[in-house]
Image (cartoon, helix red, strand yellow):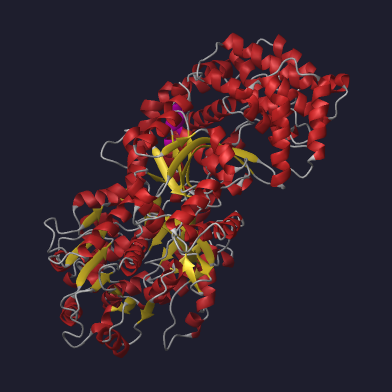
């Protein structure tokens, strides 16, 4: 079953069932005015007039269409397109002598819009052309693009995402206005926003019936829900002076809508949003604030108060608000200013720290249209400050946000009591740690204890920290520091010069052996600011000085040794930017308080923990390493890792005073991974290891034949990727020695099978850094090649391959690979090869899907290879140049009687319209001329397809 019949056609069918009107590809092409067109121009023009009476008429549509067509194919242009879609752009209306906003989509009355879906959307760019499987349009504007793969295609999702990324590079015009994309292989349905294709920004759609493709399509493209997504949940933000695009995930949109509903509820005034660390609480809060301030029709505009409890977060939040684009906002930078704002009739967003409510008068504002959003609610409203706050704003709606589990202690009960009283379960919405790991929002954490001679004395740790009643349930790092300051004996022990030197040496060696080879970075968390400086000095003896940096706040009375590591605000901003970039230094940041909350660095893999912590503070700190990471070169973070120099993980039940199942889903001992690795090698690997023995040509052919079935290959690929993820974390370790020979064999087998069944010469991006190094050190050059591999395509090579005793399957794989490589390498200078490449790809898919037998596939591949080899002689015999010959080879496939002289005539048409690639008028005329010639040759049904292929040829 093909991907079209299994996935693409059902998507079109389900879309039509929820009232998206289908447009045939040929009609869609005409409605766009050709394959460089961006919109259904006629529909867009008519809808502009219909939705904007008195503002837009026939005299004004040309200018609007001109502005829309001039949008740049960049993220900035896409942001402007989004602004048009949301009705934020305007035209001048002379009759009223003022600018009026233009409604492109009617969000308030969805029935006023026109919804279309089409497929096989060819987009011509400056150089390349690409084809999107399915495109969804509203009022003639493409809003969503879907790339679909067959469920039987291995790595279908990854292939689909790679294609979306390639389209962005080759034909960015396809994404001028398009806001979201989807990738599906029937079993899964992933979605993301255009211009943001990193793996961390791609999410799997969930519904009530997992695996139900019909439900997924209909739920995602439900017209009202989809309109909300486009208007409210596609977000452009400026972060670190760079424009970024994001989309809210389902748990975020669910929470936003519940909070909006609660804010308008006259009977309920409380709500707790309990979303785990790393799940995007800040973006959720900003979206809530934006919607509350924007959706005020029929009600008075509210005052939205956003409360935080740390100076460091205040400036960061203001930057996020400004980056988000919320215009009406203010910062209450003093108690007096806060009281002035609240006592006035100010309507908009206000940011304040909780301590500014100290001793504030009661009933300072009694309006009901006040919404208070409280960040880190488990600690922000504790004690008297919460009482002052609620007395000052007695009729406000209070929404608490927390990212840590609610503990069993008084603080947790207090959080439920303050914010959860209006909900039977104690919270308005919950997104658990286990859910976030399943979704890929966060990754699992592993920990290991440092050698016993480097950890803190257990009795001192227990007596001076773990058993202190005041340390139970501590939720603030400053409060934690105050407790540690009184534990003089413990801190002095931790900062002894001998211990600092030993740990610094251990950290340097561990980082060089374990973390740097993986391509990731690390934090070293020290007990206090002085310890940070001591560690920096000690680390510089073992690592290049620019490998590490110290980040802490200055303090009055610091000694010169402490001042040596001061950095100003601009330097810290640059440091944050550099750290999240793989290729930039530093590789290790030494901290004690700063950056332990609110700093997201997905590249951060390892935390060297040398600071006693408990409960919320511990969970917030170690959550710095649980952010997923994947780059465009295939580097994927398998887990997060904490190396404990304190010993607090020996007593998890005291270190984390939460329910045991929550703790178990957060972090596990590295020994669990070792046991998993051993189990996988002893039980599952036994089916594959024999295939990696006796590594001569015949053994390799037996292995290749064994994995001829795609499903069997898929099972092996999945197994090995899981195995190497675990290996990546554990290595180097003496524990692995008994498994090394078999593991190397499995790695070689994986590389061989990947190479054999890949179109191109094997690219080892899917092999992790440590496994790649192992292969490079242990494997003889050429050992991973398919037997009888062809490196160049020529008559002699084809003859040798035909006469060789390799299996027919191996011959097919070699021909497929060399044809693809030849087309990629020489296609620009020999454009006729593009046609051969297209046919080779279709043939490969038919063979993979068992639509043709091996013997027939071999004959067909040999025929294509001979055609490529003999093409130069054929071109000279026909007397054609490269361009005319490419035309001839393209047309003759569908019209065997097509003559060489006719290709010269078509080539003359191309020369007469030489600017057709960038001149739409010339391209339209050329297309018309080609239609006239081709219709009698290939028929009306094939005419457009062949014309598109001709227009896509790279001319030389």
- Where residue 9 appears, as percent x and y from the top left, is 44, 29
Q: Is residue 431 visible?
A: yes
Q: Nearer the viewer, residue 748 or 433?
A: 433
Q: Nearer the viewer, residue 370 or 403?
A: 370
**In which quadrant is the N terminus drawn?**
top left
Q: Quadrant of residue 839?
A: top right
- Where residue 812 appears, as percent x and y from the top left, is 62, 17
Is residue 827 found left or right of 602 in the rendered image? Answer: right
Work out whether 325 lies above or below 934: below
Is residue 663 found left or right of 46 in the rendered image? Answer: left
- Where residue 54 appears, as percent x and y from the top left, is 46, 63
Work out whether 154 lies above or below 48: above
Q: Is residue 446 visible?
A: no
Tell me, yes or no, whether the highlighted magenta stretch contains residue 719.
yes
Q: Nearer the viewer, residue 469 or 406?
A: 406
> Does the magenta stretch mainly form a helix, a strand or a loop?
helix
Q: Quadrant of residue 343?
A: bottom left
Work out whether 36 lies above or below 788: below
**Residue at the spot x=57%, y=19% of the render?**
700
Tell me, yes or no, whether the highlighted magenta stretch contains residue 637.
no
Is residue 219 found left or right of 799 in the rendered image? Answer: left
How many marks the image carries: the answer is: 0
Q: Which residues are magenta?
A: 714-722
């Amino acid at each position: 079953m093909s991907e079209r019949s299994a996935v693409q056609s059902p998507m079109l069918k389900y879309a039509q069932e929820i009232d998206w009107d289908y447009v045939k590809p040929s009609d869609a092409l005409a409605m766009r005015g050709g394959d460089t067109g961006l919109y259904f121009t006629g529909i867009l023009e008519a809808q502009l007039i219909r939705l904007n009476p008195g503002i837009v008429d026939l005299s004004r549509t040309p200018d609007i269409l001109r502005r829309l067509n001039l949008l740049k194919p960049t993220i900035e242009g896409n942001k402007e397109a989004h602004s048009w879609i949301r009705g934020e752009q305007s035209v001048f209306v002379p009759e009223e002598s003022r600018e009026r906003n233009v409604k492109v989509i009617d969000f308030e009355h969805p029935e006023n819009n026109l919804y279309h879906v089409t497929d096989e959307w060819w987009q011509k760019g400056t150089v390349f052309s690409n084809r999107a499987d399915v495109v969804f349009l509203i009022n003639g504007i493409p809003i969503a693009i879907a790339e679909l793969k067959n469920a039987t295609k291995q790595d279908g999702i990854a292939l689909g995402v790679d294609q979306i990324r390639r389209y962005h590079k080759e034909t960015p015009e396809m994404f001028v206005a398009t806001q979201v994309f989807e990738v599906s292989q029937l079993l899964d349905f992933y979605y993301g926003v255009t211009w943001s294709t990193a793996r961390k920004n791609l999410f799997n759609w969930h519904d009530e019936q997992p695996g139900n493709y019909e439900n997924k399509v209909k739920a995602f493209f439900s017209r009202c829900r989809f309109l909300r997504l486009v208007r409210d949940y596609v977000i452009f933000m400026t972060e670190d002076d760079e424009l970024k695009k994001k989309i809210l995930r389902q748990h975020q949109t669910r929470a936003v809508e519940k909070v909006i509903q609660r804010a308008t509820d006259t009977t309920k005034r409380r709500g707790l949003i309990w979303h785990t660390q790393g799940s995007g609480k800040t973006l959720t809060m900003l979206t809530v604030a934006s919607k509350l301030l924007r959706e005020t029709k029929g009600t008075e505009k509210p005052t939205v108060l956003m409360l935080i409890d740390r100076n460091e977060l205040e400036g960061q939040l203001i930057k996020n608000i400004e980056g988000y684009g919320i215009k009406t906002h203010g910062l209450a930078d003093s108690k007096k200013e806060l009281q002035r704002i609240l006592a006035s009739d100010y309507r908009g967003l206000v940011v304040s720290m909780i301590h500014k409510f100290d001793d504030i008068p009661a009933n300072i504002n009694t309006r009901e249209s006040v919404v208070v959003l409280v960040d880190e609610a488990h600690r922000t409203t504790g004690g008297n400050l919460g009482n002052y706050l609620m007395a000052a704003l007695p009729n406000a709606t209070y929404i608490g946000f927390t990212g840590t589990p609610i503990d069993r202690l008084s603080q947790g009960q207090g959080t439920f009591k303050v914010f959860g009283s209006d909900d039977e379960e104690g919270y308005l919405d919950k997104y658990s740690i286990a859910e976030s790991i399943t979704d890929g929002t966060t990754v699992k954490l592993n920990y290991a204890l440092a050698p016993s001679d480097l950890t803190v004395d257990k009795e001192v740790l227990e007596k001076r920290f773990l058993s202190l009643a005041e340390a139970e349930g501590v939720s603030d790092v400053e409060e934690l520091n105050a407790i540690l300051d009184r534990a003089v004996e413990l801190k002095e022990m931790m900062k002894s010069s001998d211990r600092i030197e030993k740990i610094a040496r251990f950290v340097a060696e561990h980082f060089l052996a374990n973390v740097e080879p993986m391509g990731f970075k690390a934090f070293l968390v020290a007990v206090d600011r002085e310890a940070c400086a001591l560690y920096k000095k000690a680390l510089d003896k073992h690592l290049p000085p620019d490998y590490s940096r110290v980040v802490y706040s200055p303090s009055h009375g610091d000694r010169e040794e402490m001042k040596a590591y001061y950095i100003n605000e601009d330097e810290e901003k640059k440091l944050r930017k550099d750290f999240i970039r793989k290729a930039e230094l530093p590789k290790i940041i030494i901290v004690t308080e700063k950056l332990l909350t609110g700093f997201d660095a997905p590249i951060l893999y390892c935390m060297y923990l040398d600071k006693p912590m408990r409960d919320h503070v511990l969970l917030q700190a170690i959550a710095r390493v649980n952010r997923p990471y994947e780059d465009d070169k295939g580097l994927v973070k398998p887990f997060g890792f904490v190396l404990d120099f304190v010993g607090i993980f020996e007593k998890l039940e005291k270190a984390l005073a939460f329910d045991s199942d929550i703790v178990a889903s957060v972090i596990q001992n590295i020994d669990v991974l070792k046991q998993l690795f051993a189990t996988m090698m002893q039980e599952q690997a036994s089916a594959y290891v024999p295939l990696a023995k006796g590594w001569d040509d015949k053994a390799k052919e037996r292995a290749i034949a064994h994995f001829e079935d795609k499903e069997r290959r898929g099972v092996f690929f999945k197994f090995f990727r899981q195995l190497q993820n675990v290996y990546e974390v554990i290595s180097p370790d003496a524990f692995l020695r008994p498994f090394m020979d078999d593991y190397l064999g499995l790695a070689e087998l994986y590389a061989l099978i990947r190479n054999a069944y890949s179109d191109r010469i094997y690219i080892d991006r899917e092999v992790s850094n440590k496994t790649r190094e192992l292969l490079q050190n242990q494997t003889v050059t050429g050992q991973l090649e398919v037997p009888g591999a062809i490196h160049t395509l020529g008559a002699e090579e084809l003859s040798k391959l035909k006469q060789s005793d390799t299996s027919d399957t191996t011959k097919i794989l070699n021909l497929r690979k060399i044809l693809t490589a030849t087309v990629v390498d020489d296609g620009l200078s020999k454009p006729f090869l593009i046609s051969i490449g297209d046919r080779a790809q279709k043939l490969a898919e038919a063979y993979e899907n068992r639509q043709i037998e091996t013997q027939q596939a071999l004959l067909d591949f040999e025929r294509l290879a001979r055609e490529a080899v003999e093409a130069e002689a054929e071109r000279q015999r026909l007397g054609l140049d490269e361009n005319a010959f490419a035309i001839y080879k393209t047309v003759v496939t569908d019209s065997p009687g097509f003559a060489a002289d006719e290709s010269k005539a078509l080539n003359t048409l191309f020369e007469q319209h030489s600017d057709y690639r960038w001149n739409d008028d010339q391209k339209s005329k050329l297309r018309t001329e080609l239609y006239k010639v081709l219709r009698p040759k290939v028929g009306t049904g094939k005419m457009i397809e062949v014309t598109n292929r001709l227009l896509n040829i790279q001319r030389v």
